[in-house]
Image: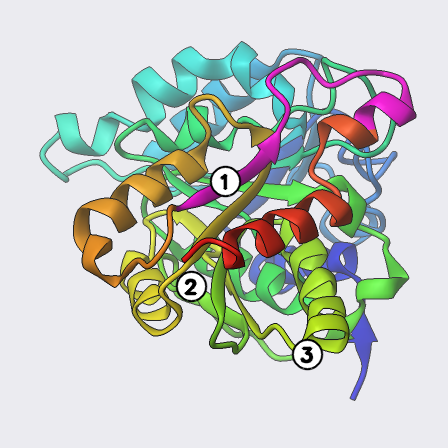
Amino acid sequence: MREITYLEAIREAMQQMMRINPDVYLIGEDVAEYGGAFGVSVGMLEEFGKERIRNTPISEDAVIGVATGSAVTGMRPIAEIMFSDFITIAMDEIANQAAKIRYMFGGKAKVPLVIRTAGGGGTGAAAQHSQSLEALIAHIPGLKVVMPSCPYDAKGLLIAAINDDNPVIFIEHKLLYKNKRYIQHVPEEIYEIPLGKGDIKRDGKDVTIVATSFMVKKCLEVSEQLKTDYAIDCEVIDPRTIRPLDIDLILESVKKTSRLICVEEACGFGGFMGEVAAQVAEYGFDYLDAPIIRITGRNCPVPYSLVLENEMIPNHERIKKGILDLLRKN
């Protein structure tokens, strides 16, 4: 059973879909000869040529504009935006065009567009290259938002996204790309993971932890430590897609554990986990034996200093403390 990295799983998904569907192509800054900012598309130019691996000028609004137009006319573009921060440059094309077209045309027009982008911090890339903007994007009706946390999910979710007839924002975490610590068995064949279907990454009975992207890894590691040190049994849920959100899976877990902790890298104010907490309070309040706790990024821009960045982003100790504090509340 082969094991591959997160980056390799994403590349394989694109390659396999391009081999079976000539309408799929990749467009973005430096995606051809250079292989993308993080090397995800290395080798794809040699296989598919410049017609289907297309470099663009440094203009995110142009990239998404071209991709949206080609999607409406029958292609299935994969548009790479180097850093998720730069999605803000193309927000008119994303929020006012791609997200609205199918609705405004009564379903007669489709927008099968995937926007791949690298999100999150931890690399010392400072405030303009390290943000987690998923809440901003998920707020917009008409968009689907995917945040895979492991190689297996990354491949299956990306294939599902490419086959979807709606625009999908596919957020890949920088710290997962080449991380050999998190390599995983990924089937060679084509498979899909349905968008909107979450996953229980760790079964438990004492507390439910809902986390996204790289925070899933941290929560799993903390959960194993708590099991060893305190016999605390955490259940870790990865929504995988935050829009649509598998709220039923979360509610079933909270019904079992009676406690909920929400963990995200993004700033807490207006963050996506506020939505998770609100829905659980609205639909599952009677299940709760303690207040819902959020562990989030600090409400400040991401610092350049790695020392300060590590303080701004939730770390293992802060997650551990949050769990222990919650379990002390009866």
Q: Residue at the spot x=56%, y=61% of the render?
A: 17
Q: Foreground residue, 103 or 86?
A: 86
Count of marks placed on residues: 3
Answer few, some or many: residues within 10 Å of disc 2's Cα (few below 14, many 20 plus, some between 14 and 19).
Answer: many
Which residue lies under the disc numbered 2? 198
- Numbered disc in front, either 3 or 1: 1
Type of amino acid at the residue the image marks with label 3: Glu
Mark closest to the chain's N terminus, 3 or 2: 3
The quadrant in which the C terminus is found is: bottom left
Magenta stretch in the rendered image: 292-309
Answer few, some or many: residues within 10 Å of disc 1's Cα (few below 14, many 20 plus, some between 14 and 19).
Answer: many
Q: Position of residue 307 (x, y in %)?
A: 90, 26
Determine the secondary structure under disc 3: loop
Which residue lies under the disc numbered 1? 294
Q: Foreground residue, 54 or 231?
A: 231
Q: Are marks 3 and 2 in contact (CB under 8 Å)?
A: no
Which residue lies under the disc numbered 3? 188
Answer few, some or many: residues within 10 Å of disc 3's Cα (few below 14, many 20 plus, some between 14 and 19).
Answer: few
Determine the secondary structure under disc 1: strand
Alpha carbons under labels 3 and 2: distance apart? 22 Å
- Numbered disc in front, either 3 or 2: 2
- Numbered disc in front, either 2 or 1: 1
Q: Residue at the spot x=85%, y=16% of the render?
A: 304
Type of amino acid at the residue the image marks with label 1: Arg
Q: Position of residue 138 (x, y in %)?
A: 38, 33
Q: Quadrant of residue 154?
A: bottom right
In the displayed structure image, the side of residue 148 where residue 242 appears, left or right: left
Q: Which mark is residue 129?
A: none
Alpha carbons under labels 3 and 1: distance apart? 38 Å
Residue 293 included in the magenta stretch of the image: yes
User: Is 168 above or below relative to 104?
Assistant: below
